[in-house]
Image (tube, rainbow, N blue to C red):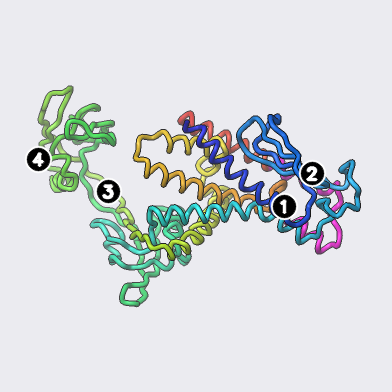
Amino acid sequence: MGILIGIILLSILMIIHELGHFLTGLKLGFRILEFNLFMGPSIYSKVVNGIQYNIKLLPIGASVRFAGEEGEDDPGYDPNDPGLFYNRPKWARAIVIGTGPAVNLLAGVLAFLIMFSTFGYTIPVIQETMRDTLADQAGLVAGDRILEANGKPVRTTLDYTAVEMFTKVDQPITLTIHAQDGSTRTVVLEPKTAERFRLGVTVEPELRDGGAIVAAVDPNSNNGQPLLRIGDVLLAANGIDYLATEGFRETVQQSAGQPITVDILREGQPQTVTMVATRFEEVLPRGVWFATDTAFLPAVNQSVQWSWSIVKVTLKSIGAIFTGQAKAEDTLSGPVGVVSMVSNVVENEQPLRDKIYQLLWMFALISVSLGFMNLLPIPPLDGHHLILIGVEAIRGKRLAPRTQTVIGVVGLALIVFLGLAGLFFDVLRLMGG
């Protein structure tokens, strides 16, 4: 079921894109030969007003075919037919080509608006600062609005997250803050480390018998003589229950390397071990926590701003691949990856409200990304065709067919390479690689 919903979501995005081309072409007098719903062999066809509508076997995607779209070599058409694709005015062709990506961008904005107005949204205003974070030590307080981060405007929380994501943990982040009293100040989140004491174990996310299940044990725990074992259930430290989360952590921290008694369940039997917490240097988290809002009118602005933020993050991510700041396998994803992510959302055990929120978020994200990527000037994407129209307007004539073919082959090779790379990384992720 999850895979099916993933395919449907991806297909809806592609159908919306092709409908943009189709409806504007119909309105602007282009001669349209076919509109195909889905792909593969046709299972139903009907001709209406000279346009053949097909429903095809494989339930993904859509396509529209304009008369004369393949160029001057198209057989069977009167070359003077004003409805042929290249006989229409350049401005009309630009609109028809541009509306595909445009409706994807608009669909993304609308999905964000539905999500924000229904579930609320974060804003770049500090909600609170937690102890032992860089935000707290730098003097950020509730109500502070972040205007800039490292010189970049922050209009959405994604703008700040993007700066944080591409800033190493040992590098500072400089913030321009607008306080509630109307003043503006500069705050620097300067990386710092602090002495920390931990039991030296990793626990599973699920609790059992009122405690945490030990998933892994650091060989250096208890001064290199581990007493805790995988499968033990942590119940208390010096009498403080594990479920009293902050109290438990504080108890271990305050032991400062002195013996501490830890109550556990081992193979179902209660035991108490006396051990020493492991000392290490911990990089303090930046600790920027944002407030939320539910007002509708600001949600409209945030929907547009979030869409623009996604475009900026996409550009930054592409640039990071070429500069070596990011790995391609962590950034590139194809249809298989998209379907897999949607499937995980659908099949995970969580409240229906959370599933709807995540699906709306993924629809908006993918729709905006699809619209933007189609505007890149790479054959055979829509952005390439818009560039050709611009070149035609400057030269007064179209590029020679052979030149267009060479450009198209090079661009298509790049698209195929990126598609195969995305598929390869999708498969690796599915295999746990």
User: What's the magenta region?
Assistant: 386-414
Q: Which residue is drawn at 81% across and 48% down?
A: 404
Q: In this view, does 304 lie above or below 207?
A: below
Q: Mark 2, mark 3: which one is toward the viewer? A: 2
Measuring from the top left, give residue 247's x and y in whole percent: 15, 47
Q: Is mark 4 on a helix, strand or loop?
A: loop
Q: Report the residue marked by disc 3.
A: 281
Q: Which residue is drawn at 41% across and 47% down?
A: 357
Q: Report the residue marked by disc 4.
A: 238
Amino acid type at circle 4 is: Asn
Q: Which mark is residue 50?
A: 2
Q: Residue at x 31, y 76 (%)?
A: 181
Q: What element carries label 1?
A: helix
Question: In front: 226, or 300?
Answer: 300
Task: Find out whether residue 402 is within the magenta segment.
Answer: yes
Q: Alpha-carbon distance for marks 2 and 1?
A: 29 Å
